[in-house]
Amino acid sequence: MSNNNYGQLYVVATPIGNLADFSYRALEILQQVDLIVAEDTRHTKKLLQHYAISNQLISLHQHNEDQQAPKLILKLQQGLNIALVSDAGTPLLSDPGMPLVTLAQQAEIKVSPIPGACALIAALSVAGLPMNRFSFMGFLARTSHARTEFFQQQLLQEATWGFYESCHRIVACLQDMAKVFPLEHEIVVARELTKLHETVVRNSLKQVLSQVISDPNMQKGEFVVLVAGMKIITNSQQLTAAQLHILQVLLKECSVKTAVALAVEITGAKKKLLYQTALELK
Ligand code: SAM
């Protein structure tokens, strides 16, 4: 239950490129609150100027949010209404804000979302991949070794999954993925969504990688990468995750025939099942 004397914290999504992707309610809230807490006040100032909103701005970013959050809670407890925004999209999604929202909830301050743009959801909405279940992995590690290990862990992920990537690492990241995933595995690269150079490419990992490598424009801007879940045979004789993993590793190095023969020896699973699975994976 919220205390009536307390102010409210509004978590407000802002555009991810196209400034028109901003709701009437978001504009009203930014105008009406006592204070706007922004990841980068200079960046938010431009948005406010575009919509002729004048309001007080305070900065809250990953390097100061642990110190700022308790001070903001005091203001909320004194009755001030506060809006939290990040540079783009929905706050807290790979963006600052978690300590403030958590503390507000603990202090029984009402926290209301003002929904809007989010790069992940925008990418999912046009990807055409199953969305009944999906996982978001945020930004991946910066080193090739850690990324490759991560991709190995994701190999058997059955649901659609995705992550954010920057222009500095998109090529290296897809190359690491190709070391682990079957080259025919389906992925989607969504770039510069809602902006002038918006591009959404859905194809095999091999095709997408070669397109990104051969076209320098495909290496610019901001990226969401979505990955189809691994198809796993669903009959009653399903392979275990470990058996499937071994088969996948072998298939990367050997022909179907050799991979299946080795997998039979290593895993003891039935040859027919391994063979059917190998044909699905290849
Ligand atoms: N909170 C934001 C959201 O709701 O999408 C994301 C913030 S995160 C710091 C920034 C990352 O989101 C970028 O590096 C990129 O991976 C992704 N991103 C943001 N805007 C994008 C866009 N217009 N097109 C594609 N990806 C975008």
Image: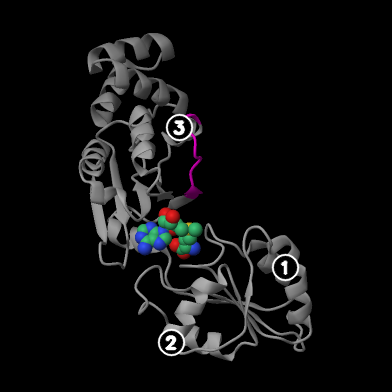
Mark 1 lies on a secondary structure that is helix
Amino acid type of disc 1? Gln
- Name which quarter of the figure residue 126 lies in: bottom left
Q: Could you tell me which residue is drawn at 45 percent across and 79 percent down?
A: 47
Circles 1 and 3: CB distance less than 8 Å? no
Quadrant into which the C terminus falls = top left
- Note whether 99 is above or below 215 in the view shown: below
Tell me, yes or no, whether the highlighted magenta stretch contains residue 140: yes
**Residue at which label 3 appears:** 144
Percent position of residue 89, x then y: 46, 68
Q: How crowded is mark 2: few (under 14 residues within 10 Å), some or many (20 or more)?
A: some
Q: Does the residue labelled 1 lie within 8 Å of ligand 1?
A: no
How far apart are the alpha carbons under marks 2 and 1?
A: 27 Å
Q: Which of marks 2 and 1 is nearer the N terminus?
A: 2
Foreground of the two, 226 or 47: 47
Mark carried by residue 68: 1
Q: Is mark 3 on a helix, strand or loop?
A: helix
Q: What stretch is highlighted in magenta?
A: 137-145
Q: What residue type is labelled 3?
A: Ser
Q: In which quarter of the image is ligand 1?
A: bottom left
Q: Nearer the viewer, residue 24 or 71?
A: 71
Q: Foreground residue, 233 or 27?
A: 27
> What percent of the width, then of the height, locates residue 114?
52, 78
**To which quarter of the image does residue 212 belong?**
top left
* Disc 1 to disc 3, C-alpha distance: 34 Å
Residue that label 2 marks: 51
Left/right of residue 12 with respect to residue 6 in the rendered view: left
